[in-house]
Amino acid sequence: MPKLAVFPKAYMKALCKDGSMKLSEWIELAASLNVDGLEWYAGFIEMQDKKNWTRLRKQVEDHGMVIPMMCCSPDFTHPDEEFRNREVSKQKEWIDMTSVLGGSYCRVLSGQARPVLSEEEGIKLAAECIEMCLPYAADRGITLILENHYKDDFWSYPEFAQKMDIFCRLVEAIDHPNFGVNYDPSNTYLAGEDPIELLEKVASRVVTMHASDRFLLEGTLDDLRKEESGAEGYARRLSHGEIGKGLNDYDQIFNILSNEGFNGWISVEDGVDGFDQLQRSVGFLKNKIGQYWPR
């Protein structure tokens, strides 16, 4: 049966930018949800001091949870080789962080979709960088997970491998036992594509999942794509929302995953409209997991 983790989507600025919230506060909040784990983010302010790593792991484990997944955003598609090498070095540091925290999965991305980049060159650069990191991850028992991503909170351009075709070509280019897919159904809509179609293509490679639901506050997906380049963060017309009430068909998603034998971690990205919303989303997912993975 899959295990459930939560991610502090509503508290990223507080935990990563202005320090108005401490990780101990988030751990206390999350513990009340009765979930199995917390997905971590490499950019938390308190994680910049390595002395905090073991202390924070202990706090999480003292609350009966673990830290299975690390969310980080390497940018492997920059045309400058020195820049890419620095990103590889950062990824290795995040792998070390994941290991010290007791995690098993560390995210990788392709990088930003810079206008000067061709599809072939971007796939080549991203695959080369990921493959440079894989032996290091394997030596530490870590699996690198490539997400069908939309855009890191602090990037200017959207994900290079946002489109299904490019994402699948990148996944197919990497064959390693310590490499898999982190599937996020919501992000597929932002590429103007069908999340079920993507899942059917990569289901055998999925080892972790992000659970969310997505809504447009106004306009259309076409409007969103016109404004997504050149500005930090997410477009204003984009909104996360309560899971089970948006566009995603979780019955179909979980049916495919359960038939494929998926038994990994599902991390909840929700709660931007309040902690009670996160509670309801967790409850929805617990019910669905029980339905599709009966004990």
Image (cartoon, rainbow, N blue to C red):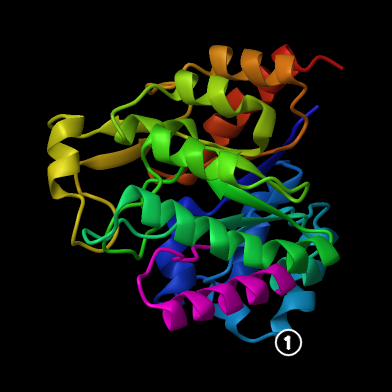
Residue that appears at 70% across and 22% down: 289
Given residues 281 and 266, the one toward you in this image is 266
- 254 versus 100 height, above or below: above
67 sits left or right of 30 in the view: right
The image quadrant that residue 291 belongs to is top right
Is 94 included in the stretch rendered in magenta? yes
Q: Name the spot of residue 239 as percent of width and height, x first.
A: 30, 40
Q: Position of residue 235 (x, y in %)?
A: 22, 49
Q: From where the camera sits, is residue 287 visible? A: yes
Look at the picture and state if 11 lies above or below 287: below
Of the pair 102 and 190, the residue shown nearer to us: 190
Highlighted magenta segment, given as a residue range:
72-96
Q: Residue at x 50, y 66 (%)?
A: 74
Residue 115: percent from left, percent from top: 21, 58
At label 1, which amino acid type do we have? Lys
Q: Quadrant of residue 46?
A: bottom right
Main structural element of the magenta stretch: helix, strand or loop? helix
Q: Label 1, secondary structure: give it.
A: helix
Mark 1 crowd level (few <14, some 14–19, many ≥20, 10 Å Cα): few
Seen at 63% across and 26% down, the residue is: 203
- Taking the image as shown, residue 202 lies to the left or right of residue 192, namely right
Q: The N terminus lies in which quarter of the figure?
A: top right
Using the rendered view, name the quadrant where residue 40 is placed: bottom right
> Disc 1 designates what residue?
51
Quadrant location of the C terminus in the rendered image: top right
Residue 276 in view (yes/no): no
Q: Residue 212 at x, y = what percent? A: 48, 35
Residue at the spot 63% in from the left edge and 16% down from the top edge: 256
In the image, taking residue 238 as reference, residue 92 lies left or right, namely right
